[in-house]
Image (cartoon, rainbow, N blue to C red):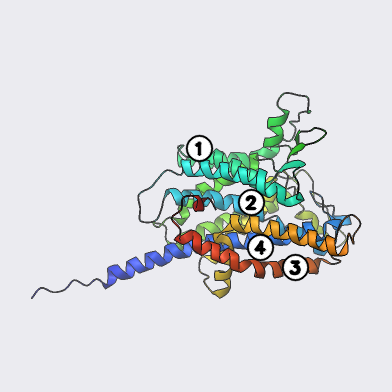
């Protein structure tokens, strides 16, 4: 009688591999979900606390500590999302247990789709009209995806080198300036200098998110993505993420601590340690300075490593916001627009030209309430996205 083969080790290995794949994807979605919720807080602030607006970098003497750190938390949103977009693009091109495929077409189409969403649905949601066009974070993400699509055929090491060169080198370009009447102004404003690229009596277009540093960020996300391949062991991946994250923080402390390079506005010692710390982390976001990216991406890499081994009910809730980010992004903007207009209609402008709340903690409470409210439709859309075979759904 022929002995039956022992399949338990193979099945155990396969199950372990599937769990690893699932855990890796979950950690990315959880981190993306976290930054989406921080983004929600910031957009609530912009709707209901705009009478205490903040500058870039933040004017510390005119900004309360609670408002300062509320704004700082929002700094993680754009860099983490762009970085994870590059990481996810590599994972799309290298699906687990399947043959590699080109991500070029998907990146190009989705990038153009996101740009269309920015100039249509997103821009209208901010003002409820179309008197001006502000090219913001979705524009930057879309252009970064288009650029990555054009570069995916390059050797992987060269993509990483380009990413590092842009992120570490773009601060050296601050001396380059163009006047609106000069050739090159529009291109340079889109790439590096924030400003209006079209003005008229009836319509203006402003490039609010200079895209060059974001292109570097998406390239770095694509470069580090093989850390999440099936062939990479969990321990090795965590070590790589932690070492990369702490390297960013150590480099930041050196560059920022001695005001060497990476931020145009030097930090100063304040009257107490809180004031000094606020000055130290008060970075430029438009465009994101090297120090800004070292801070946000350094923390993000460490958090991503920590999330690799966390799987509980709370993270599962957060994960849903990360599996349908574009849907949640558009939905929350229109909920905020409708809520704000409804409150103005009921109570009028209570804070000068705006309706608003009195305290920062109220901003966080409103954001929490909206997160709970929007959790269910976002979760439902995420499930529909996974089950649907429709081609258009993958763009969300």
- Quadrant of the rendered structure where residue 210 is? top right
The mark that comes first in sequence, 1 or 4, is 4
Q: Is residue 138 above or below residue 63?
A: above
Q: Nearer the viewer, residue 70 or 242?
A: 70
Q: Does label 1 or label 2 sit earlier along the sequence?
A: 2
Residues under labels 4 and 3: Cα distance? 12 Å
The residue sitting at 35% across, 56% down in the picture is: 97
Residue 37 is tagged as 4
Residue 395 in the figure: left or right of residue 230: right
Which residue has dot 1 on it? 151
State how far apart marks 1 and 3 are (Cα).
Answer: 42 Å
Q: On the rendered structure, is 217 left or right of 363?
A: left
Q: Position of residue 355 (x, y in %)?
A: 85, 60
- SS class, disc 2: helix
Residue that mark 2 sits on: 79
Q: Earlier in the sequence, mark 4 or mark 3?
A: 4
SS class of the residue under badge 1? helix
Q: CA distance from mark 4 to mark 2?
A: 14 Å
10 Å crowding of disc 4: few (<14), some (14-19), many (20+): many
State the separation of the CA atoms marked 1 and 4: 31 Å
Mark 1 and 2 residues: CB-CB less than 8 Å, in contact?
no
Q: Quadrant of residue 211?
A: top right
Instruction: Residue 305: tell me if it is visible.
Output: no
Q: Nearer the viewer, residue 28 or 143?
A: 143
Q: Which is more foreground, mark 1 or mark 3?
A: 3
Disc on the earlier residue, 4 or 2: 4
Q: Nearer the viewer, mark 2 or mark 3?
A: 3
Q: Which mark is residue 366?
A: 3
């Amino acid at each position: 009688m022929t002995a039956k083969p022992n399949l338990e080790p193979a099945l155990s290995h396969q199950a372990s591999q599937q769990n690893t794949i699932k855990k890796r994807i979950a950690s990315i979605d959880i981190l993306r979900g976290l930054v989406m919720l921080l983004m929600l807080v910031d957009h609530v602030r912009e709707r209901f606390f705009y009478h205490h607006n903040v500058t870039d970098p933040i004017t510390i003497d005119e900004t309360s500590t609670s408002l300062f750190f509320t704004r700082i938390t929002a700094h993680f949103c754009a860099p983490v999302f762009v970085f994870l977009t590059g990481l996810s693009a590599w994972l799309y091109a290298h699906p687990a247990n399947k043959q590699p495929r080109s991500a070029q077409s998907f990146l190009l189409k989705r990038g153009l789709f996101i740009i269309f969403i920015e100039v249509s649905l997103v821009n209208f949601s901010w003002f409820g009209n179309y008197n001006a066009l502000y090219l913001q974070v979705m524009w930057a993400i879309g252009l970064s995806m288009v650029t990555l699509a054009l570069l995916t055929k390059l050797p992987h090491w060269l993509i990483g080198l380009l990413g590092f060169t842009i992120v570490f080198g773009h601060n050296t370009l601050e001396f380059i300036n163009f006047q609106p009447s000069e050739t090159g102004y529009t291109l340079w404003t889109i790439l590096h200098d924030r400003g209006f690229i079209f003005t008229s009596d009836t319509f203006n277009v402003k490039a609010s998110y200079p895209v060059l540093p974001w292109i570097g960020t998406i390239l770095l996300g694509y470069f580090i993505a093989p850390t999440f391949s099936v062939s990479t062991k969990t321990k090795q991946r965590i070590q790589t993420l932690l070492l990369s994250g702490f390297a960013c923080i150590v480099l930041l402390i050196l560059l920022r601590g001695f005001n060497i390079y990476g931020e145009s506005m030097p930090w100063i010692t304040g009257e107490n340690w809180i004031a000094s710390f606020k000055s130290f982390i008060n970075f430029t976001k438009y465009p994101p300075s090297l120090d800004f990216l070292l801070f946000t991406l350094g923390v993000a890499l460490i958090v991503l490593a920590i999330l690799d081994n966390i799987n509980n009910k709370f993270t599962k809730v957060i994960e849903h916001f990360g599996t349908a980010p574009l849907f949640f992004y558009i939905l929350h903007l229109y909920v905020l627009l409708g809520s704000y207009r409804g409150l103005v209609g009921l109570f009028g402008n209570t804070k000068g030209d705006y309706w608003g709340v009195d305290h920062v903690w109220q901003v966080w409470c409103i954001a929490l309430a909206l997160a709970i409210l929007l959790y269910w439709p976002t979760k439902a859309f995420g499930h529909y996205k996974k089950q649907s075979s429709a081609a258009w759904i993958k763009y969300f």
